[in-house]
Amino acid sequence: MGRRFDNCFATNSLCSPSRASILTGTYSHVNGVTTLVTPIDAAQPTFVSLLKGAGYRTAMVGKWHMGEGPGHDPQHFDYWDVLIDQGEYNDPQLLSADGLRVEPGYTTDVLTDLALTWLDSLDGDDPWCLLLYHKAPHRPWVPHPRHAGLFDDEIPVPPTFDDDYATRSSSARRAAMRIAEHLTQEDLKEDPPAGLSYEEEALWKYQRFMQDYLRCVTAVDESVGRVIDHLRARGEFADTLLMYASDQGFFLGDHGWFDKRFMYEESLRMPLLLSYPRRLPAGEPFTGIVTNVDWAQTILAAAGVEPHPRMQGRSFWPDLLGTPEAPPADGMYYRYWEHDDVFHKAPAHYGYRTDRYKLIYFYNDGLGLPGTGPFTYPGEWELYDLAEDPRELRNVYHDPAYAPIVADLTRRLAAEQARLLDKPHPSQGRSA
């Protein structure tokens, strides 16, 4: 029961920046978390701080991953218990207001236990907000032994697994996230069988990667079930707004890749389910364009709390109730800042996506930000017609038939950057 969102998008498909956008309701250039190593100013307004100010009890358990230490540790929470960086899959180190400790057990189970223990510690009728942020299914995908043997049957290979990048820019081709070449011994847990060809080994690696990925997801699914069962037992399920999501999409062999970062669909799209039985009847999937920047204002609207003026998103709560207060979004803006990082070499880029088209500009410059590489490359453009080419295999930016579309999207991209107070890269005009 609830609603599924079929067009929810990340505005910067990377863990730390996406988490900062979710909390603050702002884009990366506003909240300051542009890369994995640009820590958050945790004092800035968030939907949690506003809920706390409205009388909510607040808690955060799990993956924080936005820096640690004075000024960066979680703020605005009555209780917080967070992993260090990415955290471990077993016996995780956890940091709280009381200091650092190790909790024995499998991390997905440990985090769920801590979250439900806090919930049971509450007394009185104060409303509450609990963020349960799992590590799984992040790399290196270590499942619980109870899930060994699951997904042993052959897992279907994505139709774009053998993408040859024929029409893509050189910017995209530089990325170091190919399943065939960049998965490690730690990821795979065993060596490939001897005597395989390059293509056969790539398929073997895909199966091993996906088995452990899905086994890790199974533990998360069990956690979600425990939370729902717990709320039902407390008689609170119908009166609780539940959001089930990830912080970005992920390549699962699509285009031969793992990881995320790119503005391509598999990385850009975020899974999102929302449930609030007392106020939101189950319905058809919501197909309007929403982003992670919209979540803060949506949560606040559902709680009847005014958003902070600096928040940049658009609440979609009225749309769910059938009483929209603003025109639907006709597109979304994306910007990936962590150019040429040491592990994946993904290029810095920004772009604009509508229902049908996606324009991307790879500006290939780290701008001196922490976590970026030292090299710059010439700017390059890509355009995809998602109606004719939903798998994004044919870059049509240089196709004369699409020249009017390029011109229109370039104008809309500039207008959205101006509205959001972001700046185009100086090379953009030279490259067009």
Image (spheres, grey):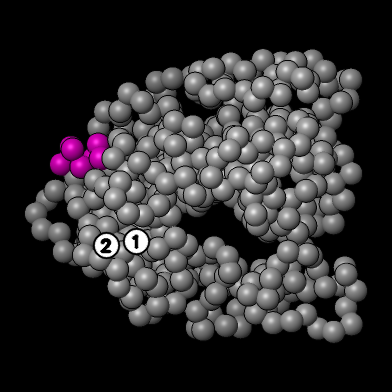
* Mark 2 vs 1, N-terminal side: 1
**Magenta-colored span:** 49-55
Specify whether 359 is left or right of 227.
right
Q: Quadrant of the C terminus?
A: top right
Label 2 sits on what residue type? Ser
At 55% from the left and 74% from the top, the residue drawn is: 142
Can you give x and y, in whole percent of width and height, for residue 49 in the image? Answer: 25, 40
Name the secondary structure under disc 1.
strand
- Above or below — where is 223 with respect to 406? below
Q: Which residue is pictured at 59% across the width and 26% down the height?
A: 331
Report whether 141 appears left or right of 219: right
Q: Please, what is the three-letter code of the amino acid marked with disc 1?
A: Val
Q: Position of residue 27 (x, y in %)?
A: 48, 33
Location of residue 59 by image quarter: bottom left
Residue 424 x %, y %: 62, 23
Residue at 20% across / 42% down in the picture?
A: 52
Q: Which residue is mark 1?
A: 82
**SS state under label 2:** strand
Asked whether 53 falls inside the magenta stretch, the response is: yes
Label number found at residue 96: 2
